[in-house]
Amino acid sequence: MVFAEADGPLDVTLLIFPGFSLLSLAATLDPLRGANRVLARGAYRWRLVTMDGKPATASCGLELAVDGAFDPEDVGALLIVVAAFGADRQSVPPTLRAIRKAARRAQTVIGVEAGAWVLARAGLLDGRRATTHWEDLEEFAAAFAHVEVVPDRFVGDGPCYTTGGATPALDLMLTLIRARHGYSAALDVASLYIYEEMRTGADTQPVVSLGRIRHHEPRVAEAIRIMEASLDTALTMAALARRLGLSARSLEVLFRRTVGASPGAYFLKLRLGAARRLVLDTNLSMAEIAARSGFSSISALSRAFRRAYGEAPSMARRKRS
């Protein structure tokens, strides 16, 4: 395992798939550079590769040059698979065979964001705990019945690690640095990014990043967390207020003062956001999407969707690329 105290350099192979998130790659790679700077030595050596050796285009359109083609016979002790959009289409049998072969040579394998999907399709996560980006957790669990899917920021199970996205990847890399070089080195690397909240893997991925709301108005933060966990239920704002020990009027005032919207409007926004992701990113039926996002019927979903986005959900799905 690479998550252990060590003096020698760690060789890292980063396999990049087209459509990757630039931020997720930066959060994975740059802490290694930061560690080399803090430790004043080459503690980490890395190669960026694609399956065919050609540049990979990020989801933002930026083209990334790489060091060459992926060779499963020549991987570092740590293999990191970075993927996002299109990972499902890219997980073709020859690619999966190569990754399985490489995983037998590497000591540890990490799937960043949709990299978890690639590892799962390669069979590397069978019987293990794993996570992926919070938007895809339900579909991930449905697709891989032999994987124990959890909503954690990052998960390690045996030689396989998976992360939920960019900042969880940063947390995982800081955990790696801490394991190999001590807590002080990890804190020094975190300080390079003015990153004050090193999180553990067991922390749940938030749907809404609350930032200062947690400290400024914790009751609103707790209300939002309850909303996130209740997207598929008929949660009333009166019931929410009671759970928080507030009157409905007090909850209304707090929400308008903190987030500039009523709690009902904010909850509807969360539900519509969930519905829109399911419309664009899955092939679930409209009835299933309505149920998962707390709408009583397809027509109720369609009316709310059209008011929010200017078109029916069926039209949005037909227009997706």
Image (tube, rainbow, N blue to C red):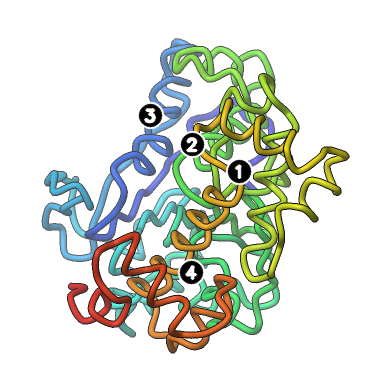
With respect to residue 287, does 35 lie above or below?
A: above
Work out whether residue 43 can be spotted. Answer: yes
Sequence order check: which comes first, mark 3 or mark 2?
A: 2
Is 112 or 301 nearer to us in this picture? 301
3D distance between C-alphas at marks 1 and 4: 18 Å
266, 89: nearer the viewer: 266
Between disc 3 and disc 4, whose residue precedes? 3
Say which residue label 1 marks: 2
Callout 2 touching callout 1 (CB < 8 Å):
yes
Q: In this rendering, which labeled residue sits more in front, label 2 or label 4?
A: 4
Residue 33 placed where, x, y %? Answer: 38, 24
Which residue position holds label 4?
A: 119
Using the numbered discs, state the Cα–Cα distance from disc 1 to disc 3 in whole angstroms.
Answer: 18 Å
The three-letter code of the residue at mark 2 reads Leu
Q: Alpha carbon of mark 3 to alpha carbon of mark 4: how far?
A: 23 Å
Q: Nearer the viewer, mark 3 or mark 2?
A: 3
Residue that appears at 69% across and 65% down:
129
| 62 or 236: nearer the viewer | 236
Q: Using the image, determine if residue 36 lies above or below residue 157.
A: above
Which is more N-terminal, label 4 or label 1? 1
Residue at disc 1, secondary structure: loop
